[in-house]
Image (cartoon, grey):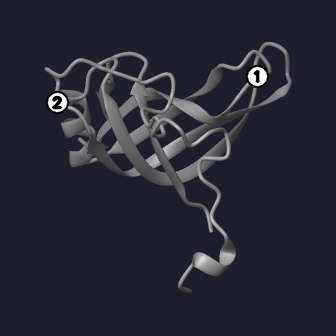
Amino acid sequence: MNAIHLVGRLTKDPELKYFEDGTASTTFQLAVRRPFKNREGKYDSDFIPIQVSGKSAESAANYLRKGQRCGVNGWLKIDNRKDEKSGEWKSFTKVIATNVEFLESANSTPSVPEEPQYNPPEGLGDDYGMVDDGDIPF
């Protein structure tokens, strides 16, 4: 199965183009934070190229802007092309979006918390109140 589900922020405004048959195609890049911290204790991001076609492409181009958060469902496509100058084969990876969800309006201010917003109640210590397995009803 080739299925991709991403949530991230646009790195720049989407680019809309039309094919000769009139089909719309929009491309944009999504910055997606990795789910773990690096050695310096910070989160890294991956910058993933996205392509969407049809009516969804027009909607994405009209309503998405740089910095907005959106969700993408789709599939991974890898193109192999021969470089005309060097003669070497190169791979290009992108996500072909089948669904794009707008998670923020164009007027909202992007906000990405650096750390989780949950703070445990005081007095629990480092173990956050260990529970004895015998206390669990299932």
Please determine whether, in this image, residue 2 is positioned above or below residue 101.
Answer: below
Q: Are marks 2 and 1 in contact (CB under 8 Å)?
A: no
Where on the picture, by quarter, is residue 78? top right
Please identify, in this view, whether the residue under mark 2 or under mark 1 is nearer the observer.
Answer: 2
Q: Is residue 19 visible?
A: no
Quick one: label 2 or label 1, which is nearer the N terminus? Answer: 1
Vertical relation: 111 (above or below) 85: below
- Residue occupying the point 21% across, 37% down: 58
Identified by mark 1, the residue type is: Asp
Question: Can you give x and y, in whole percent of width and height, for residue 129 in the image?
Answer: 59, 52
Residue at the outermost front position: 123
Instruction: Please identify the residue farthest to the left as the structure is shown.
Output: 107
Residue 9 picture location, percent across and down: 40, 27
- Residue indicated by mark 1: 83
Mark 1 closeness class: few <14, some 14–19, many ≥20 residues within 10 Å: few
* Residue at the image position 80 percent from the left and 20 percent from the top: 39
In the rendered structure, the answer to whether residue 63 lies left or right of residue 94 reads left
Quadrant into which the C terminus falls: bottom right
The answer to which quarter of the image holds residue 132 is bottom right
Quadrant, the N terminus:
bottom right
Q: Quadrant of residue 64?
A: top left
Name the residue tied to disc 2. Answer: 105
Q: Tag 2: residue type? A: Ser
